[in-house]
Amino acid sequence: MGFSMQPYGIQAMLKEGHKHMSGLDEAVLKNIDACKQLSTITRTSLGPNGMNKMVINHLDKLFVTNDAATIVNELEVQHPAAKLLVLAGKAQQEEIGDGANLTISFAGEILQGAEELIRMGLHPSEIISGYTKAINKTIEVLEELVEEGSENMDVRNTEEVIYRMKAAVASKQFGQEEILCPLIADACIQVCPKNPANFNVDNVRVAKLLGGGLHNSTIVRGMVLKSDAVGSIKNMEKAKVAVFAGGVDTSATETKGTVLIHNAEQLENYAKTEEAKVEGLIKAVAESGAEVIVSGAAVGEMALHFCERYKLMVLKISSKFELRRFCRTTGAVAMLKLCQPNPDDLGYVDSVSVEEIGGARVTIVRNEGGGNSVSTVVLRGSTDSILDDLERAVDDGVNTYKAMCRDSRIVPGAAATEIELARRLKEFSFKETGLDQYAIAKFAESFEMVPKTLAENAGLNAMEIISSLYAEHASGKTKVGIDLENGVCADISTMNVWDLYVTKFFALKYAADAACTVLRVDQIIMAKPAGGPRRDQQPGGGMDED
């Protein structure tokens, strides 16, 4: 290599091949740019009229969805700054289960505002302090916008639940929320424990079955297993259940031994003893009162034969998690090996039956009894992609239910809240004297992204709508939002579009945090990736169309 390429400066200090970027242009603006790219992707999927994205991940699996959390999870985001936004979106998805899109899009928007300020000559630290003041003020204003009397709600009242859940579901499956919401609300209310704050999202399952349409979807109190019963007995009513985690099979002996057989009689007797042993085990289970056996692994031929003889229904659940849920539904205790179960270990089901739904055989385990702990939403749809998307909508609904169990306060939806926040923050920025005021004003403007995007995605004229929203809000009508169906501004309390306060609260908080983190970076030092050329830096690029 000779002396011609002697590195200098920081390069000289670091190992060869390190990339180093510093300063406003190289680091800050490039980071902001990457984040803007990410938020451009999610932004067009915001809201009920959001567009779908088609993401094909590295395993060739196809996702067609407008759920931002799924989109950014499946995009392999390489850029470190954009990854921060992805993490913020993920945090929102884990915390609330809805509003990931708002988080990412809003963070991108306030970063774009920051970029303009930097180009005007503001220092990033001034922007950060302005943004911090702005987010604190936002949270204050958000508290004031909470609808009165919404803090106490009856989480078991379907109407009230649907009222709060509609917006979250509609933003995923617009036009179908009328069918989906009652289903989800029902499913959630059935499994809601005595103390709603302990609601467990995992107790609402989704079973996706191809065929039919959304209106064929139903809800089952209990579980839906996507497999057939093993034996010939296909249904049981009001039965006791024994669950064996280790499988029902002959090789129940743990020790290996060699048996020396001298003559034919001994051979016959040996086979007979094995048979008698299995029969004894199955008989013991049958005598304990169990009528349904659930096995967590393979069911042996011989064992199955005796199960049939003793009229036991046999189910096989290979997934450990499903088995656990099954135990939760029935109140059974899983036993490790085949032995006579205690009466306390047996579970109970109202009915177990194998039904055929759209060509697929499914076993439906119903437990109508009161303190039921699992319910299943059976979704029907014409393609896998649609089913996946419906499942995401249900997930969002269930998560929203969980959030509203903890905090049921609501704020106006349909961009009414955002416009009000923008207006109040603008006023607040005029009162500030330092350079922060510009940052606060930019932060306020960023809220316009929500109504603007909602309007644009619905094909309306965004400018007109925003100005008429401002006009309405200035005259004190704080609940005016966009009526997307008719393309006008309307009071959202008449349309019943409400968002949960916690969703907004965390989305804006996470967005502001992520944006400030990105702005705090002024140098990026990237190590040379270990090993040969990376697949995304190959000659010809890693993205060749095949």
Image (cartoon, grey):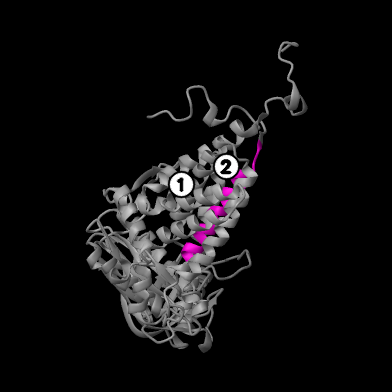
Q: Tell me: 326 left or right of 183.
A: right
Q: Is residue 12 magenta?
A: no
- Residue 161 in sight in this render: yes
Please, what secondary structure does the residue beneath circle 2 have?
Answer: helix
Local SS, label 1: helix
Disc 1 residue type (three-letter): Glu
Judging by the rendered image, the residue that carries numbered circle 2 is 81
- Residue 515 magenta-highlighted: yes
Q: Nearer the viewer, residue 483 or 252?
A: 483
| Residue in the picture at 59% in, 31% down | 25
Identify the amino acid type marked 2: Ala
Earlier sequence position, callout 1 versus callout 2? 1
In this picture, residue 266 sits left or right of residue 315:
right
* Residue 172 visible to an observer of this rendering: no
Q: Position of residue 216 (x, y in %)?
A: 23, 67
Q: Which mark is residue 74?
A: 1
Q: Is 111 placed above or below 149 here?
A: above
Which quarter of the figure has residue 136? Answer: bottom right
User: Which residue range is magenta in the image?
Assistant: 503-523
- Vertical placement of residue 499 versus 434, above or below: below
